[in-house]
Image (spheres, grey):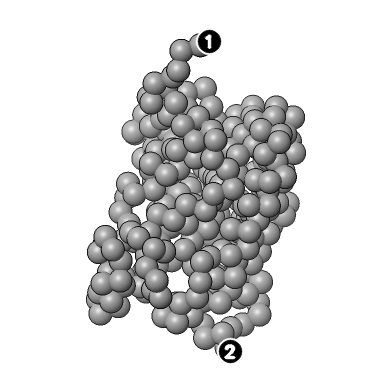
Amino acid sequence: MAAARTISQLHDLHGRTALLTGGSRGLGLQMAHALGEAGARLLISARKQGDLDEAAAELRAAGHAVDTFAADGRDDAQVTALVDHALATLGQVDILVNNAGATWGAPAQDHPLDAWDKVMDLNVRSVFLLAREVARRSMLPRRQGRIINIASIAALGGSASMQAAAYHASKGAVASLTRALACEWGPQGINVNAILPGVFPSRMARHLLAPGTVEPILAQLPLRRVGDDEALKGAVLLLASDAGKHITGVLLPVDGGASAVVGA
């Protein structure tokens, strides 16, 4: 029998490849750093090439191997082109992090339908399409792979303060999709999990972090703080590496304890 691997060996991603959407800033860039630090070769994608160039320069300065590809997840053809480029550049995709997302704030009774469609197209349709194409073209033939969908604690319930019905609905759909794919693709060696971030400093959450708004949010969190620039690193590395090889279909909140509070 082979000797059990060490913790360091289980977390080692040298020789593996990772495709991350929404990888040019915020949570996506943080997760790219984590996977790069563990040894993975990276391909990051976002809509704007200029943002990708800045992120790639930061990642390369940290010693990580990274390529970029600009694509809008709301465009099916661009998603397919992203997978084409990933396979041509990386050879295979071992780890897929579906992180790109959008929100729209409006009272439900006033929520524009075109905004609803934009949120659902990026947050749900593109997640499914990218997972389907990567699985079909790279993971299923090799009977191995890790898919990590970035949902939100908004998937677990509503929020009167957010007033973002499409965002809540889309992240709930991502959570259910994650479990469905985990069940369907698990027998073929693919682990599918979701991370559910709470409040982190980001463009998407900036309205929640304004003075006078953030204090009541912090008061409800058991840890009394929002996420920072390293709070997702451990979670994504666990789910991407062999350290998490027996974890699938899990919705992992990284939220300062918000999801543990009854009535929060």
Check disc 2: other Cα within 10 Å, few if <14, some if 14-19, many if 20+: few
Observer able to see residue 47: yes
Number of marks in the rendered image: 2
At which x and y percent is residue 149? 56, 50
Q: Secondary structure at mark 2?
A: helix
Structural crowding at the residue carrying mark 1, measured as other residues with C-alpha within 10 Å and reported as few (<14), some (14–19) or many (≥20): few
Mark 2 residue type:
Gln
The numbered mark, 2 or 1, whose residue comes first in the sequence reads 1
Give the CA separation, mark 2 to mark 1. 62 Å
**What residue do we see at 49% from left, 40% from top?**
239
Residue indicated by mark 1 = 1
- In this rendering, would 256 be left or right of 41? left
Query: Most extreme residue toward the bottom, as rendered?
Result: 109
Question: Is 6 drawn above or below residue 121 in the view shown?
Answer: above
Do tag 2 and tag 1 residues touch (Cβ < 8 Å)?
A: no
Quadrant containing the C terminus in the rendered view: bottom left
Tell me where residue 67 appears, x and y as whole percent. Answer: 52, 35
Residue 197 drawn above or below residue 209: above
Which type of secondary structure does the marked residue at label 1 adopt?
Answer: loop
Residue sticking out furthest to the top: 1
Q: Comparing marks 2 and 1, which lies closer to the viewer?
A: 1
The residue drawn where x is 52% and y is 86% is: 107
Residue beneath label 2, please? Answer: 109
| Residue 59 higher or lower than 264, as above or below | above
Three-letter amino acid code at disc 1? Met
